[in-house]
Image (cartoon, coloured by chain):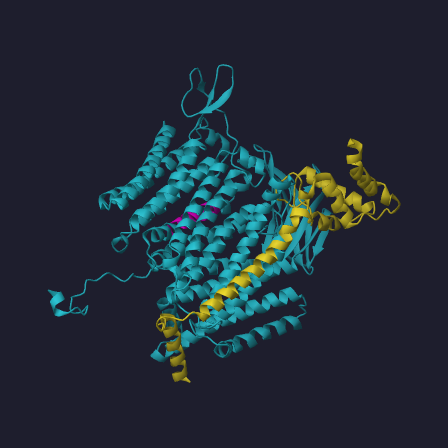
Chain colours: A cyan, B yellow
Amino acid sequence: MIADFGFFALLTALMLAVYGCAAAIFGYLRKVPKWVGSARAAALLAFPLLTLSALSLVYSLVSLDFQIEYVAQVTSRSMPLYLRATALWGGQAGSLLFWSWLMSAFASAVMLRDWRRDRDLQPWVILVCLATLGFFLSLILFFENPFVRLWQGTTGTVWTALWQPGGAQAYLPFDGNGLNPLLRHPGMIIHPPMLYLGFVSFVIPFAFAIAALVTGRSDDRWIRVTRRWTLVAWLFLSLGLLLGSRWAYDVLGWGGYWGWDPVEIAAFMPWLTGTAFLHSVMIQEKRGLFKHWNLLLIILTYDLVIFGTFLTRSGVLSSVHAFAQSAIGPMFFIFIAVTLVASLALLSKRWQTLKSDVQMTSLLSREALFLLNNFLFISILLICFLGVIFPLASEILTGQQITVGPIYYETATGPLWAALLLLMGVAPLSAWRASTARTLGRAIWKPLIGSLLVVAVLLLNGMRHPGALLGFWLCAYVVLVTLYEFWRGAFARQAKGENFALALWRLVARNRRRYGGYVIHLGVVLIAIGIIGIEFFQQETQGQLAIGERLQVGGYAVEYKELAEFQTSDGRLVDRAVVNVYRDGVFVRELYPRQDFYMESRQPMTIPGLHSSWEVDVYVLLVSWEPISNANATFKLYVNPLVSWVWLGGMVFIFGTLVAAWPEREAELVRLPARARGLPAEARG
Amino acid sequence: MKILSLLPGIILLLAVYAGPAAAQGPTPSVDEVNAIAKNLYCPVCANVPLDACGTAACAQWRQQISDLLIAGHSEQQIYDYFVQQYGPGVLATPPPGGLNWLIYLLPPAVVLLGAALVWRSLAAWRKKKPRSKPATTGENKYSKMIEDELKARR
């Protein structure tokens, strides 16, 4: 009953999406605002309908209605309530419904904005949002329906259908398969919604860009309207990536947080173009340059969002054959091709009107340095894209399966990341339009000397690794440049009689975008410090220990104390070791590395014992043990320097994004008296 | 014909197992095995390095690496053996040759081409003559204000 309700809500939402697209185009072509208003109403209505549909599925999941195939696939009796509810995005069909629900929420939110200044853009924004929503709803209804049920024929055969086939009875398994153990982690509960929020919110700036292209508006209005939407999208995508990294660190049990896995890169690619776009739009706003480029970037970001969803949902990553067998894979492929070709065709049609006659006066101006920033981001994107598609291309063209692992990505993108760090330390000091080597040099020398002093201290402390020294020098330089910028601004404000703290507060409050951006830069540097630490100085060892024996690496030792095996109420068989951690022979603390064996899915999980400090993470894995006696156990010990800085940097990064995105009052449209507008007396009428 | 096509594999297997029989080495440590396993990918699980894979099959493959090290094989010979047995997909990077050259050549080509494009664009923009003198941007006005205040305070 509830499933039928969810299905019909879904179907109605699809019909509304199709109707909304048609009404928006008709209203625009016939210039009848009523039709556009009707399309807007359709976009608004899709959200409550999809909310009802998603709630129906959540109700079925929570109440363990195992006759629904999706519920039987992703839940089980032993799962706690919160996991049953979040299983909404634990499987293919549910996550597509969740994606669509979020998309409809964003489409509704954008419909509720004040459209008075942008009436001409509205029908096309509606069309893009509803076409994207309609595509996902079609996938759900025709290929991945979460409401299909299990039925059993008289011969005992079980099959799936939405409604009862003739001669069949409802089939109700006693228990379900349960959620994939990898997804049973607090990080994984929040990680997918954050990523999806990032994905769907990038649809909004894309919709405005397409609307500007169709209507021929060559001004930067679409950028100004969507600036905050883009920042919000970027914020969620960044949060999703950070949470995913933390989840990998806590759950996957390989001592790291980023493995350059194609699924990770699928979410990382739109982040790269989104970051380039956020920098590049500033050039259009300040100097009127890069209009084509900004449109191209947002088109790329949108299609990379769809491509990312396609990569993770079509099965293409495991094998091209899985893609061919998957029903939704080819549909995604067609949708990406159609939207990309149509968007690029529109862009080429408007190419001439978007041309700018603005001159770039200096190669050291901020716009020139932002162009370099974009070049670096796009180079990293292309390297990542090549790394993801090359194994697929190889399998198609030569029949050979190959792997493109982290070495490729790290070698190819490492120098580009270093160049980006350097740019972060130069661009904030350069001026728009005119900047010379002399003016830039005058601004740079103080932070430069400070950063070289940091390198000297590191050398005196015995650090000799050239890559790490270069990395730390760049980090120190960017931090000093950024702090110097804050200090200069606050110091100047003190002339107004404000104390330093108040001056700093007002400085940031009145220039949120600029100083929010600087805080983001500080966050990036902190993340970079963590990455340099683990990349250049990670140490590991593995060994079998008898009770009381120790395993040592990098000044740390773990001592095996005991191991216990027990069952939990959520269906796990847990083997939990107790180890003591020592630093230079001095006891630090106890850790509890363990292996959880999920009995329903017969899948093991290795959960590390973790001791974190600002200096180092001690990360202990229980690899194996002698059954029954537990007299011996094998442990893997990682010493990961500076990893905590990655998470601290992530928090600073998110805080900076919030500062930059914090709403400011948009200039109101005020009807001025004719005299004030400088109109001649006769025109004042 | 079939035997002939199998010949390279047979020779490699002989080389791996029989060749260095005289050169029996000491039992390698787990860390030595993992150092090699880190550069190999589990042939069964997607995108999981062999040193981090927890399956029984991967434990056997790590044991195989250990056996080959005891038998006196070099690191490169072990990689070759795994490629022969399970295909080039076990290597962390594709072996150079044929289509695989693209993965080595395209990244530097992309960066060089991009750098050339950026340089050309910058040069073209510098040559362009603006129709009117551009107004000072708000950002520059802001920077100038800070500079003036700082000068006044010195």
Write down the quadrant of residue A679 in the picture: bottom left
* Residue A296 place in picture, x, y as percent: 44, 54
Drawn side of residue A299 relative to residue A547, left or right: left
Visible residue check, residue A367:
yes
Nearest the camera: A657 or A443? A443
With respect to residue A588, does A364 lie above or below? below
Image: magenta residue range? A190-205
With respect to residue A70, does A421 lie above or below? below
Nearest the camera: A456 or A642? A456
Nearest the camera: B66 or A584? B66
Drawn side of residue A98 relative to residue A40, left or right: right
* Residue occupying image coordinates x 62% and y 51%: B103
Drawn side of residue A597 relative to residue A50, left or right: right
* Residue A475 place in picture, x, y as percent: 55, 67
* Residue B98 place in picture, x, y as percent: 67, 47
Visible residue check, residue A618:
no
* Residue occupying image coordinates x 16% and y 66%: A673
With respect to residue A297, does B3 lie above or below? above
Write down the quadrant of residue A587 in the picture: bottom right
Check the picture and name the quadrant holding the C terminus of chain A: bottom left
Check the picture and name the quadrant holding the N terminus of chain A: top left
* Residue occupying image coordinates x 80% and y 37%: B7
- Farthest right residue in view: B22
Queried whether the magenta region covers residue B96, the answer comes back as: no
Judged by its main secondary structure, the magenta piece is helix
Q: How many marks?
A: 0
* Residue A379 place in picture, x, y as percent: 54, 57
Queried whether the magenta region covers residue A198, the answer comes back as: yes
